[in-house]
Image (cartoon, rainbow, N blue to C red):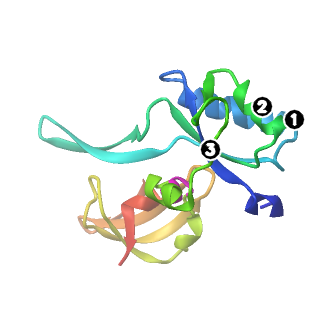
Amino acid sequence: MDLGSDEARWYVIHTYSGHENKVKDNMESMVKNQDLGDMIFDVQVPMEDYVEEKEGVKKLKERKMFPSYVLVKMIMNDKSWYVVRNTRGVTGFVGPGSKPIPLSDEEVQNLGVSRVEKTMDTYAVGDRVKVLTGPFEDFIGTVEALDTEKQKIKVSISMFGRDTLVELDENQLVEA
């Protein structure tokens, strides 16, 4: 990552309801197309897992932690402010008036940005892991592959005397 990212701070932007992922995609495209990777480093829609039970069947699902809000890690200057503020679907920065206020380190931790910024280097192929949630809860398996692009981990789990490959999120696992 660029050394300038050390100076970058997390900001909260408000979006039209239901446009969070579109805003994220639009902003990432603008950063790439306008070569702004040295001032806008990350755009995240914080998500959380929850278990939904329908007709006695539990399913692990994902939902937005803060509907209508997106987090942006950036170095604040006139150009980055303009790009973010003029991204389709953005209604403005969170802060008094038009002055964006960065999140404190404590707020970033409390918001779970570390959960959003998943690090796939926590696990390695061959590691023994235990599944925490979902249909394979409490199963022990072996990491077979890491898909950093999809942020998924493929785990081989023994079921009924047969190995089954399942794709899980990092936060569904713990070292066994």
Badge 3: residue crowd in 10 Å (few <14, some 14–19, many ≥20): some
Q: Mark 3 and mark 1 in contact (Cβ < 8 Å)?
A: no
Q: Which residue is mark 1?
A: 34
Residue at 81%, 42% (x, y): give it. Answer: 77
Question: Which residue occupies 59% across, 70% down?
Answer: 121
Per the image, the residue denoted by label 3 is: 101
Magenta region includes residue 42: no
Question: How far across and down, in percent of the image, does residue 161 sit?
Answer: 26, 69
The mark closer to the camera, 2 or 1, is 2
Q: Nearer the viewer, residue 16 or 94?
A: 94
56 vs 114, left or right, is left
Q: Amino acid at mark 2?
A: Val
Residue 82 spot, x, y in % from top left: 78, 30
Residue 85 against residue 42 in the figure, above or below: above
Q: Report, in whole angstroms, how far the alpha carbon at label 1 lies from the one at label 3.
A: 24 Å
Pick out the residue farthest to the front: 96
Q: Nearer the viewer, residue 81 or 159?
A: 81
Q: Which residues are magenta?
A: 113-117
